[in-house]
Amino acid sequence: MVHSLGLTLYNLRPRRVPSKGAVWADRPEGRVIWMHAPSVETSRGLFELAGRLIDEEQVTVLFSCADPLPERRGIICVRPPEDRALEARAFLEHWRPEIALFSDGELRPAVLHAASEIGLHQIMVDGRTPYVLKDRNGWYPGLMRSTLQGFTRVLTMDEAAARAFRKGGAPLSAVSVVGRMEEDSTALPCLEAERAALAKLLATRPVWLAVGLPEAEEAAVIAAHRAAQSLAHRLLLIIAPEDPARAQGLAKRLADEEGWIVAERAEDQEPDADVEVFIADGVAELGLWYRLAPITFMGGSLAGQGCIRNPMEPAALGSAILYGPRPGVYGSTFGRLGAARAARAVGSASDLGEALSDLLSPDRAARLAQAAWSVASDGAEVTEQVLTVVRRVLAGEK
């Protein structure tokens, strides 16, 4: 990597807070691959890739992200090192990774320069546009160009992204358009015998699911269900509450105060022909409910703090998606679904009832679900391409 004047100035910038020595766990034996994502949302493709590498190449994955991440088998989650030369070198000397994979386009110049000095292979995946850490104000001439020069491969989502990386200074031979990687294991499992039994019980009944439903949206969902029943009197609503502890109280309120015929999964009750609302029990069986419900409303997106569950979960299992104006951390995911006409947005509680009624037409729900499934399954080939690149580096090939 060319040592630019910009890098010198960048490394001389004043500290905002005193440095605190990082404390890390012991490095595991064997090969370590380092992956970095700027946020939870940009981490999903990397997590799918990580799972494949752990299972197929028997490596340990070190995963850094500024946002908290859930624990996963074979993955060590850490905060990224502060982007300064001393901290970067300490991080790399401790973990000794063989490859560094960055996503989205975020550049950490001090870290990446230190990686280049020790000959660490650097690969950008799911590239959209290059940018230096967004809170690093200042003028650093040549900094982006010198940082991008350290990448041996830059794998972008589309041609516009490829142009942005070439313009930013990435080696022309390193940049290629491959698309977006597959997201992390969105097809949730279920017991097939259980699915078959419930599908037989439900027969031809129309069914919809409200998943990750917060208390603030319960009234809106019930109102939408009531409105849609005027078109389909046998309509069944399955509710998977955001807080499973609310299930029993919600069932009692709907039955005693509003007159609904309610069954509870936690009480081993079945959604018999006369049941109007079925309260699911926890998240362990979401794969079952997605398979049984042709329509899913994403809880938290209407009046909550943001969508609770990943919309790719119902998309991967053929359920049409309804969502409100608060996508939360899934903004870009809903953007992809919307661009593919694979999800239906609603702006208010009254809109939810209208949209649900419209999707009770099986052909309309099926078109939406098919488009959603296509988006969810898109990217598997890209993940294979990235795997091939990583395997070649691990094998010592160029």
Image (tube, rainbow, N blue to C red):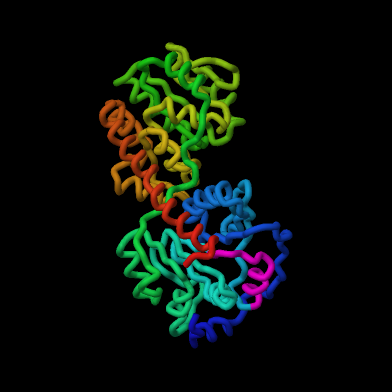
Query: Who's the residue at 69% across and 67% down the image?
Result: 94
- Is residue 272 visible to us here? yes
Please state which of residues 149 and 98 is positioned toward the viewer in this rendering.
98
Q: Position of residue 238 (x, y in %)?
A: 46, 25
Against 285, residue 160 (above or below) is below
Q: Is residue 183 left or right of residue 355?
A: right
At which x and y percent is residue 175?
Answer: 37, 68
72 inside magenta stretch: no
Would residue 379 be found to the left or right of residue 14 on screen? left
Seen in the picture, residue 285 relative to 216 is either above or below; the reply is above
Which percent across, then down, holds residue 269? Answer: 55, 15
Q: Is residue 136 above or below residue 384?
A: below
Number of marks present in the image shown = 0
- Residue at 68% over, 74% down: 19
Q: As drawn, which residue projects farthest toward the bottom?
A: 5
Residue 131 percent across, percent down from the top left: 44, 70
* 374 to the left or right of 118: left
User: Going 47% across and 22% down the picture, which residue do you hit?
Assistant: 195
- Evaluate whether residue 66 shows in this view: no
Front-most of residues 126 and 346:
126
The stretch in magenta equals 86-100
